[in-house]
Image: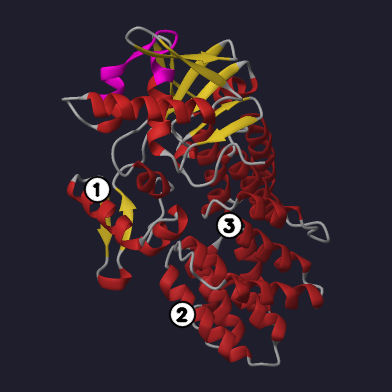
Amino acid sequence: MDQLIAAAARALAAGRPLEALKRVALRDDASGLALRAIAMAQLGDLERARGCLRGAARAFGPHAAVARARCLVAEAEIALALRDLAWPARRLDAARAVLERQGDMVNAAHAQYIEARRLLLLGRLEQAERMLARPAGELLPAALQAVAALAEAGIAMRRMQARAARAALARARQIAGRAGIAPLQAEVEHALHALDAPAARLTAGAEQRLVGLDEIEALSAGPTLVVDACRHAVRNGCTVVVLARRPVLFLLARALGEAWPGDAPREALIAHVFRTRHPDESHRARLRVEIGRLRSALRSLAGIEATPRGYVLAPGARQVAVLAWPDETPHAAVLALLADGESWSSSALALALGASQRTVQRSLDALATAGRVLPLGHGRARRWLAASVPEFATSLLLPGPWFSN
């Protein structure tokens, strides 16, 4: 490796892309192309960086397996930054296997953490956790240690484990400060801000207020029956009843939770659940049937008693609380993913949300009409950016159940 290449590599490792670019901007050999691509990626020119990386991989040729694997890892990181979540993960797995066989454990760990972050965006928390738990070999550079801590914090935040998230972010802040890389430090501060921001709206009796992750974690650990309108579930401690695929039952559970300790009138329940202003005997009969189904579903957590004017929740817990999204406007889940400040394609949003691309496109069109998202580009290259970052944490809006084990 010549001196210019070595100096450019050191500058990139320290987070100084302009210094690296000065040394390799006019180089068209394989190593120069690869380092130029990484520098451009750090400066935000991701599409050109991806093209340079592919050119570098071709220039290295089939015999330079390690160099080609490193190019693939860098391309995977660019795909992650572009939110190209459909980028073939098997190529990254193959590259990581080559690097591990050749003893390049630092870049192998880098590939491992990229895949963990992609899985986190897709809401596959258990897979991401297993990826992070894999041994990383030798002592890693501070920057990679900080990335791993950030991913651990992201998993904890999705699961509403505020204490674990705060510990991981404290560790990430300390390590990022030691690394001295400004963008990494900024990412840690952004995550800390999200952790401290309101994460849900709590309704308990007549009280309604915004709460953070710390209070949500304490609430779920205490003697409180939680009706979670963010994940469509009802829980008390470790006992969870998921009603995500039974929307009528969940609407009833939420209405009863919001009315507690009083009862919910039959007419109000019919209007809320069945969307009618003129209930008749058939609606009342259907309400009795659905209440019976809900009573059966919640039998391990609470009873439901009839009153002269409606129904009341009779929980086994001392308190009942309803958690709802801070923003319950339509398409809030799409806004939650866009709140990271990156530009997303509609196909990537559909993958992350587990929805059809056409559904996501309709949401984006509605949000664009309201001025809440901005389109970039045209046709298949079009991406979407949030017009403004919401002033609340989006953990409860993102994919991945907070009660998963």
- For marks 2 and 3, the one nearer the N-term is 2
**Mark 1 crowdedness (10 Å alpha carbons): few <14, some 14-19, many ≥20:** many
As helix, strand or loop, the secondary structure at mark 1 comes to helix
Which amino acid type is shown beneath numbered disc 1? Leu
- For marks 2 and 1, the one nearer the N-term is 2
Q: Quadrant of residue 164?
A: top right
Specify whether residue 267 is painted magenta. yes
Mark number, residue 367: 1
Residue 270 horizontal side relative to residue 396, left or right: left
- For marks 1 and 3, the one nearer the N-term is 3
Q: In which quadrant will I find the C terminus?
A: top right
Please provide the residue range marked out in magenta.
256-270
Q: Quadrant of residue 118?
A: bottom right
Q: Name the residue under label 3.
A: 119
Task: Give the mark toward the camera: 2 or 3.
Answer: 3
- In this view, 175 is above or below 308: below
